[in-house]
Image (tube, rainbow, N blue to C red):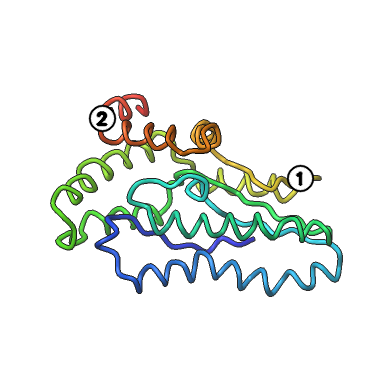
Amino acid sequence: VSNAGVGMAGPLECQSLAAMQSLMDTNFFGLVRLVKEVLPDMKRRRGGHIVVISSIMGLQGIVFNDIYSASKFAVEGFCESLVVQALRFNVAISLVEPGPVMTEFETKLYEEAERADYSRTDPETAEIFTKLYLRNSRDVFTSLGQTPEDIAEHTLRVIEAARPPFRHQTNVAYTPMAALKHADPSGALITDAFYKLVFKYDAVLRFGLR
């Protein structure tokens, strides 16, 4: 089970390249290093199961989570490319895709975001992040957040499955979002929907979550 991860949220201009590279080294290359270690033996034994804790943000990018989403997209693409070869050797790969999870990981991330220096971006972007994004994120976590124990139960079900799924989303509230993206290959539908939720109807979004 690959579960190592770090987070990053905020305007792109305010993130250092060193911090971005460090995040990718943990979230993506950490997984790659693990798989390189365990896969050869699994192939020799003709059996095994690699379970990767991914994220719904590996399927759909979320505003102000550019680098974190990129790392999870990389995880998803890596596993999607590898799974066909792995199946030839009777090795299963499963991606567990949570939405928001209420842990110290997220609490620390948002506390740091509230104290951060946003002088390297323009005032409008800084205000959108601090006034809209952070406020809406609290409502999302309060209304849709899962406990770590809930994610562990989902992961256990994936591990014990007779035919392990390649993807398993733990939060049914996010299934429509994933479906909306696939419904329109041009990307216009999901982009328009998110733009309106963030910039036009954020009050409706928060009311609906509550």
Residue 40 locus on image (x, y percent): 77, 73
Residue 21 locus on image (x, y percent): 41, 71
* Residue, far right: 45
SS at badge 1: loop
User: In the picture, residue 68 is in which quadrant?
Assistant: bottom left
Crowd band around label 1 with a 10 angstrom C-alpha radius: few (<14), some (14–19), many (20+): few
SS at badge 2: loop
Q: Nearer the viewer, mark 1 or mark 2?
A: 2
Residue 58 locus on image (x, y percent): 51, 50
User: In the picture, residue 93 is in which quadrant?
Assistant: bottom right
Of the pair 7 and 195, the residue shown nearer to us: 195
Give the residue at mark 2.
200
The amino acid type of the residue labelled 2 equals Lys
Left or right: 118 as drawn, with respect to 160 = left
The residue lying at 55 percent from left, 70 percent from top is 30
The residue lying at 18 percent from left, 63 percent from top is 120
The residue lying at 46 percent from left, 39 percent from top is 187
* Label pair 1/2, CB-CB below 8 angstroms: no
Left or right: 95 as drawn, with respect to 40 = left
Of the pair 51 and 154, the residue shown nearer to us: 51
Give the residue at mark 1.
161
State the separation of the CA atoms marked 1 and 2: 43 Å
User: In the picture, residue 108 is in which quadrant?
Assistant: bottom left
Q: Can see residue 172?
A: no
Residue 34 locus on image (x, y percent): 63, 70
Left or right: 62 as drawn, with respect to 132 = right
Tell me the quarter of the image containing the N terminus. Answer: bottom right
The residue lying at 18 percent from left, 58 percent from top is 121
The amino acid type of the residue labelled 1 equals Ala
Q: Can see residue 3?
A: yes
Query: First in sequence: mark 1 or mark 2?
Result: 1
